[in-house]
Amino acid sequence: MTDINLKIYRFNPEEESVGKFVEYKVPYVDGMVVLDAVRYVQEKIDPTLAIRWNCKAAKCGSCSAEINNRPSLMCKTRVDSIGNNISVAPMGAYPNIKDLVTDISANWSILKKIPPFTPKPGMEKPWRIHPADVERSKEFKKCIECFLCQDVCHVIREHNTKYFGPRHMVKAASMDMHPLDVLDRSEFLDNEGGIGFCNITKCCQDVCPEHIHITDNAIIQEKERAADLKYDPIAMIIKRRKSRKEKVVK
Amino acid sequence: MVENVTATKNTGETRKPLIPVELTEANWRFWSFILLALIAIYLMTEFQVPVVQGLTDPFYSPTILVLPLVAGFRATCYAYRKDYHRHLFNHPNACNIDVRKDFKGRKYTGETRLFRLENYHRYFWYTAVAILPFFYYDLYIAFTYQAGEFTLSLGALLLILNTLWVTIYTFSCHYFRHATGGNIDCYSCPVNKKSVRRGFFNKISAINHHHEMFAWISLASFFLVDLFIRGVAAGLSINPILLNFKW
Ligand code: SF4
Ligand code: SF4
Ligand code: FES
């Protein structure tokens, strides 16, 4: 492959009010990922370029960006998979701090709102769990908090609602489906978390670098659980008659 | 492309109309879909299928009354929800940032307000299950319509496939997955209790994974088989007998 035409979004809040794309030429090296190309610019062409990255192994979730308009990890996107005209922009759902670095702190306050893991009282330690029973919860634990799912979700990005966003549905589901947790957060997610704003369009699932089935395994499951508690009169009667093992958070 | 807006403020829901904006917006995709549906209904009434051997086309008999149930089942199905929210309402049309046709400032209520009804999908699922036996009854008739004989015609073969797709579609439903075990957090509590239910849940999860594919295959097969039957009723000789024996 010849040189890469790399367009990087540059924005310096101290000097300008809107950012712009700047084009760089980067020599192609076999097997390189977009992060390599961006770092080449930072090291060899313009050291003022701000980027955030850590592991270069798709495990820390720091290098999220919009590569050719698709939210992706810079360290996991191979240049040979997308051709040599590449644009890199910061995540548009979050306020820009500088160049490719965004302020994702809104997520930390949402995470604090979700009722934490609450184990059943009086369990003997060490806790023993059948491996097959933690499988569902374990899928969600793979989340690396890259927030690409939040970035691509149209509810978060384009519409101003109270929806927590897919990452947070995954977080809540990881605890709700844990065999030793006693809380049921689904009604809380419907009332406070705005899960009703999610319209199952599955973009979050498409971009998740950990291939978590966010919509199918977390969101739809939580919606169905909320329907049991809030919408379906028959399920409500059945649930009320059974001595309820789980405490419902509203 | 990247604007410097202050990020997602969680300001909550303001007073929004009950009728979702999706149904009132000027959106050519949605309205051309409505137009096509109207044209289809017009054609159905204009070109009536004759009564054959005492059988009336369901479209002109009380059988049509099950249509809202079947339509409701599909309209509240998670697979189709994705499709119409994406492709009719453009919320968003695609995931890539530059081509999604959704934008800031456009009104949106998602599955709150009127679309909250989608939470009642399970009730439509119950009716869908109640309707399923009729498919099998039709199959039985298709094999045995000549007294004392077993007949396998091309049409009966198509009916088998159609019944199969509809059955798989119905039982790969997300609600059924939830009911079979999705709502259970621990199958083997206390530790190592044997659980048949987990195995069943895993099987349903496996077919649920392809629910969207079954949704579209079964819908297409539904229409094509219906077209085939209409063709037969209209007197076209497209239904060769493949196998026939007396019993
Ligand atoms: S499925 Fe729901 S959470 Fe995921 S991107 Fe679509 S609206 Fe957002
Ligand atoms: S769920 Fe996937 S896309 Fe979302 S933050 Fe976690 S790893 Fe990233
Ligand atoms: S640098 Fe850690 S995920 Fe990309």
Image (cartoon, helix red, strand yellow):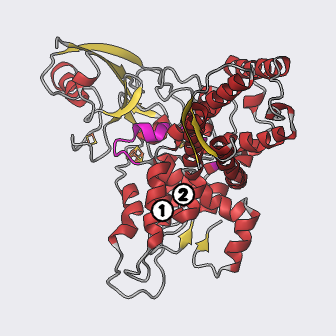
**Closer to the N terminus: mark 2 or mark 1?**
2
**Residue bearing the label numbered 2:** B177
| Amino acid at circle 2 | Arg
Residue B55: x percent and y percent?
Answer: 81, 35
First to last magenta residue range: A196-212
- Residue B57 sits in quarter: top right
**Secondary structure of residue under mark 2:** helix
Residue A204 magenta-drawn? yes
Chain of the residue that carries numbered disc 1 in the rendered image: B
Depth check, front residue: A18 or B173? B173
Q: Is residue B9 left or right of residue A82?
A: right
Residue B22: x percent and y percent?
Answer: 72, 30
Q: Is residue A187 left or right of residue A220?
A: right
Q: With respect to residue B246, does A234 lie above or below?
A: below
Q: How many marks?
A: 2
Res. B22 visible in picture: yes
Res. A117 visible in picture: no
Depth check, front residue: B59 or B6? B59
* Dots 2 and 1 on the same chain: yes
Residue B148 magenta-drawn? no
Residue at the location (36% across, 61% down)? A138
**Residue bearing the label numbered 1:** B201
Residue at the location (70% across, 76% down)? A240
Mark 2 and mark 1: Cα distance apart in space: 7 Å
**Secondary structure of residue under mark 1:** helix
| Amino acid at circle 1 | Phe
Q: With respect to residue A178, does A121 lie above or below?
A: below
Please identify the residue farthest to the left as the structure is shown: A30
- Residue A159 sits in quarter: top right
Q: Residues within 10 Å of mark 2 (few under 14, many from 20)?
A: many
Labels 2 & 1 near each other (Cβ < 8 A) = yes
